[in-house]
Every structure is written in structure tokens, then in C-alpha cells.
Image: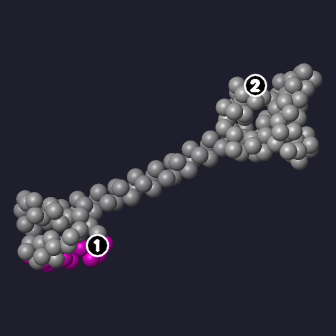
Amino acid sequence: MIKLVVESETAAVRTAQTLIERTREEITDQSSQRQLINLIESIIIYKLPQKSREEIEAMFELSDLKQTRVYQEALAEGEEQGLERGLERGLERGLQEGERLVVENLLRVRFGELDPEIQAIISRILQLSPEEFTPLLLHCSKQELLNQFGNCQ
């Protein structure tokens, strides 16, 4: 097993194949057999990071690589990171949409229905922080807002 860690990639693959065959032949306890094969697979996965799961499965005639602890842990970690990123993006989009609604509502309250000129400047207004755009929306006239945000090309 130690040789597997220190050998070259090519030699490690041959050694791993031999170890997996011997494990299947010599270890009768299914739990022990699975644990040993998981250990061999884990070493090979870390030894051959450039290989895909399918390539490793084919190399060792394994069809249940997805069941290994290493694969399951990597999958769980990937799912967790994906979920975190998704939540962050969702929260960010939700906040942006909330700010857009605040700006639109303030403009409606001040000027009635939003005409195309006002709609055209909303995205520029949203480039400001809420602390910056709120006083402008409350105190500037429609023409002042159009002058300030309408001529930015």
C-alpha cells in the first residue's frame, strides 16, 4: 500500500490494479473489502488528479466509484459550495430588485406613472447607494433628475 503512494503514476496504476484484484480474492468480509478498495481508490484519485471519474473507473473496472467515501465527500463539498454561491447570488439579485422597486415606487409617488424618460434613468440612479439616491428622489424635481441622470452617456 505504501508503494502505491510513492510510485510513479504508471506503476501506481498497475500496483492499484493488483491490490484491488488481491483484495477481491483474499478478503471475504465485504465491509473490510470495500474499505480497502476505497482506500486504494482514494490514493489513485489523489495521485491522478487530471483523470476523470470515468477514466479511473475504466482503468480499474470499477462501476461504483460514485459510492466511495472520497467521491461522496467531494460531491457533498461541491454541492455545498454551489449552494452557497447560489444563495449569495440570489440574495444579491433580490437586494438589487428590492432597490429597483424602492426607486420606482418613490418616483411613482412623486411624479405619477413612470414615463419612458424616467424609466430610462432608473438604472443610472441605481448605481448610487440607497443613502445617495433616496434624498435625490425625495427632493429633486423630475427635470433635475432628468438633467442629472439623463445626459450620462
User: In the picture, which quadrant includes the N terminus?
Assistant: top right
Q: Residues within 10 Å of mark 1 (few under 14, many from 20)?
A: few
Q: Which mark is residue 128?
A: 1
In the figure, residue 8 lies in which quadrant?
top right
Residue 136 falls left or right of residue 23: left
86 to 57, vertically: above or below: below
Q: CA distance from mark 1 to mark 2?
A: 59 Å
User: What's the mark number on residue 75?
Assistant: none
Q: Amino acid at mark 1?
A: Leu
Highlighted magenta segment, given as a residue range: 128-141
Image height of 118 relative to 15, above or below: below
Q: Residue 152 in the image: state x and y as whole percent.
A: 20, 73
Q: Nearer the viewer, mark 1 or mark 2?
A: 2
| Residue 59, picture quadrant | top right
Q: Secondary structure at mark 1?
A: loop
- Mark 2 — residue? 61
Image-based side of 20 in relation to 117, left or right: right
95 with respect to 35 (left or right) = left
Residue drawn at the location 28% of the way across and 72% of the way down: 128
x, y percent for residue 129: 31, 72
Total number of numbered labels?
A: 2
Question: Is residue 121 depicted above or below 83 in this figure?
Answer: below
Q: Foreground residue, 19 or 7?
A: 7
